[in-house]
Image (cartoon, rainbow, N blue to C red):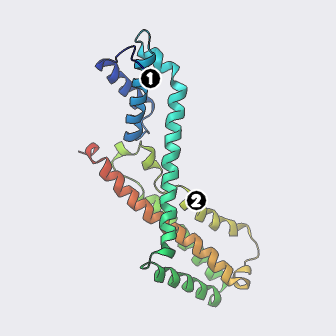
Amino acid sequence: MEKRYEITEKQLNFLEDFLDRKYPQVNEEVRVELIDHLVSDFEETSENGNLSQYLSNELGFIRRFTDSRVQLVQVDYDKKVWVQYFSFFTNIKRIPITLFTFLLMYFLSENLSNEVIWLCFFFSVLFIYGFSLFTSTIKPKKLRKFKEVQFLGTGLGFGIPYMMVMIPLVIENRDFISDYSFVFSLYWFFAFSLSIASLIAMFKEKKIILEKYKHLLN
């Protein structure tokens, strides 16, 4: 479509400042994509060059655009967690560790008392959860406004194990641990290994974020 109007440098600066104030949580790539779309649409549809009026008319679109991109960031982060989890069963170097971990849990479930096993399960999973909350924090406060930073230490990878720990709390009969030790071992192993996968994914993502925004830290 042919341009009706060409945005000025002053208007472009206004647009960038507007998005920074209204949507500070948007990462750099989404911000650039959004600005490019808004500028193109404004130049093609504007009849009087009134950028403020244009933006007020496009608030709904901007909100939907940013929300959809934020959801994609969360989905992508969760995918990385599951990639790490399945690598425990596909990576030759990790398979022995995976097998040893499960056999250890099964051995403990068979030989220790229900109370001790329950405590081992409870603390092994919740310790990783608590550790992730502590280590996911990025110290430069200027980066904490980004959603991709806020997603660190969250998501299904930590949410599912946390819920799996909470569920047995409402079960009065703990004898199921010894009665179904193999099944409980699978349950424990899944919660623990998914927590570990989430922790690995979180550290990798944190490293990428710090490298990506290192120019903001200088």
Q: Residue at x 51, y 75 (%)?
A: 89
Q: Nearer the viewer, mark 2 or mark 1?
A: 1
The count of marks equals 2
In the image as oriented, which residue stretches furthest toward the right?
A: 173
Q: Is residue 54 above or below residue 161?
A: above
Find residue 55 and report its horizontal and vertical position in percent: 46, 20
Is 112 on the left or on the right of 215, as rendered? right
Q: Position of residue 82 (x, y in %)?
A: 52, 63
Q: Amino acid at mark 1?
A: Asp
Residue toward you, 66 or 125: 66
Outermost residue on the front side: it is 1
Q: Position of residue 160 (x, y in %)?
A: 60, 62
Q: Can you identify the residue that label 2 sits on?
A: 159
Q: Is residue 1 above or below residue 124?
A: above
- Label 2 and label 1: CA atoms lie apart by 40 Å
The crowding category of the residue bearing disc 2, from other C-alpha atoms within 10 Å (few below 14, some 14 to 19, many at least 20), is some
Q: Quadrant for residue 102, please give it.
A: bottom right
Residue occupying image coordinates x 44% and y 79%: 92
Check disc 2 and report its element: helix, strand or loop: helix
Q: Quadrant of the C terminus?
A: top left
Question: Residue 194 falls in which quadrant of the image?
Answer: bottom right
| Amino acid of disc 2 | Gly
On-image quarter of the N terminus: top left
Q: Is residue 200 visible to the viewer in this orientation of the structure?
A: yes
User: What residue would you read off at disc 1?
Assistant: 41
Residue at the spot x=33%, y=23% of the render?
12
Camera-nearest residue between 72 and 162: 72
Specify few, some or many for label 1: CA neighbours under 10 Å numbering under 14, 14-19, or 20 or more. Answer: some
On residue 201, the disc is none
Say which residue appears at 56% left-offset and 86% top-offset: 103
Most distant residue in the bottom direction: 111
